[in-house]
Amino acid sequence: MKHMIIGNGGAGIRAAEVIRARDTGADITIVDEEPYRCYYRMMLPDFISGWKEFDAVFTVPESYYRDKRFEFLPSSRVSSVQTGISTVKLVGGRELGYDRLLIASGAFPRRLEVPGVGLDGVVTLRTLDDALNIVERCKTARSAVTLGGGLLGVELARCFNERGLASHYLIREDRFWPQMLDAAGSAIVERLLAKKGVMLATEETIAEIKGERGRVAGVITSKGRELEAQIVGISVGVAPRLAFLAGSGLEMNLGIRVDDHMRTNVPEVFAAGDVAEAYDVVHNEHRINTSYMNARRQGEVAGANMAGGDEAQGGTIPFNLIRIYGLSVTCMGLSLPPDEGYDIFTGPFPQGDQYKKLVLKDDVLVGATLIGDVKEATKLEELIKKGVKVKGAKEKLMEGDFDLSEIVNKSAG
């Protein structure tokens, strides 16, 4: 059996490992457009800021692919997938056949459309090459401006600050991470950033990037402020890598539509990670949920089924974890209710840099936010995914003194 995997990140590598464990004789090929062995993208900010050494970003040793008997094709970009004849075509013309295919090609940063965005010194952070580029630029820069109210935006602003640059951080919305955090949760993060020296401004964006001799010299904000900068970091979201799938016959919306087994509409083709639209149990629709944990889980399910198994993910929910200057922030499910038909419990929080919020609908936990102490995160996630009735256990959930199996079993009974 010949297995082809497009993508060398968390989803692709986990799938390859599971296939190998289930089928020691399988022919497994991993194709990736980057030249590096698998690395942990969430470690890149720590590398840029100087907290981690270069080798720390890699999740596998150099001998990994040889030891696992994977054929690894780095620096190889896929130009098309021809599902009718089970063939992957690479840029340059090489064609590779497969029996089963996993598409785990990840995502790329969205572009900000403002004057000056093409100047030398405008950066994004997605790949290891991006990180290496930023490290070099920080050696001679004095100041930086970052735009983006989400996880990578705050990481870029933090990196510039840690490298000793004057770090301005612009957020278009009224608070940090408004897609997942409420005002109380955002305020905790914003106070921490201010304490560390990051100059945060909300409801302000970049109107124009100014340059001198083709290089970034500063920005003009939407409020008319002029900020000096030799680096401008842009983080305004990501989009799945799908262009090479034109004409493939795969069902796609924002991403590739998959069932709970990570199968697409085309037999023997699977998808996982940042390109996969899987069923979201709290939104009751197929959605892309981008997180490393989700990618690994979907890769595991896909790999098992490519090797002849019958595994299911059991649905997915938004689940994001980030550490900002050592402060852990976790949001999951419907952490921001869409209307008034939900019950919100915060108990005695916020308390200093600690926050806990539970969101319930009809006595079912559908969302949660944890800041500071996040040790209950995986248990709360399981309750959300299972749709368990927690009537009578709300106080225990808020206190953190609960037995997950007891709640699940009581609900089942």
Image: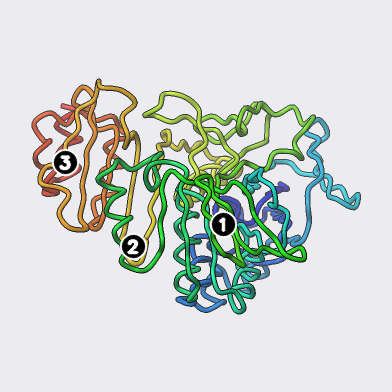
Q: Amino acid at mark 2?
A: Ala
From the top left corner, tell me how far across and down residue 196 is, in percent: 35, 68
- In depth, the one of 36 and 224 nearer the eye is 224
Q: In the rendered structure, are the residues bearing label 3 and label 2 in contact, judged by CB atoms less than 8 Å apart?
A: no
Find residue 268 and report its image quarter.
Answer: top right
Q: How is the image coloured?
A: rainbow
- Give the percent coordinates (x, y) of residue 390: 16, 31
- Residue bearing mark 3: 346
Question: Quick one: label 2, few (<14), some, or many (20+) residues within 10 Å?
Answer: few
Crowd class of label 1 (few under 14; some 14 to 19; many from 20; radius 10 Å): some
Tag in front: 3 or 2: 2
- Identify the residue shown where x is 54% and y is 50%: 221
Q: Is residue 154 visible?
A: yes
User: What is the number of the mark on residue 17?
Assistant: 1
Q: Label 1 is placed on what type of residue?
A: Glu
Q: Give the amino acid at mark 3.
A: Thr
Mark 1 and mark 3: span between their CA atoms? 41 Å
Q: CA distance from mark 1 to mark 2?
A: 43 Å
Is mark 1 in CB contact (under 8 Å) with mark 3?
no
Give the numbered dot on residue 194.
2
Q: Residue at x 58, y 45 (%)?
A: 238
Q: Residue at x 64, y 75 (%)?
A: 136
Q: Is residue 106 visible?
A: no
Q: Position of residue 160 (x, y in %)?
A: 50, 68
State the separation of the CA atoms marked 3 and 2: 25 Å
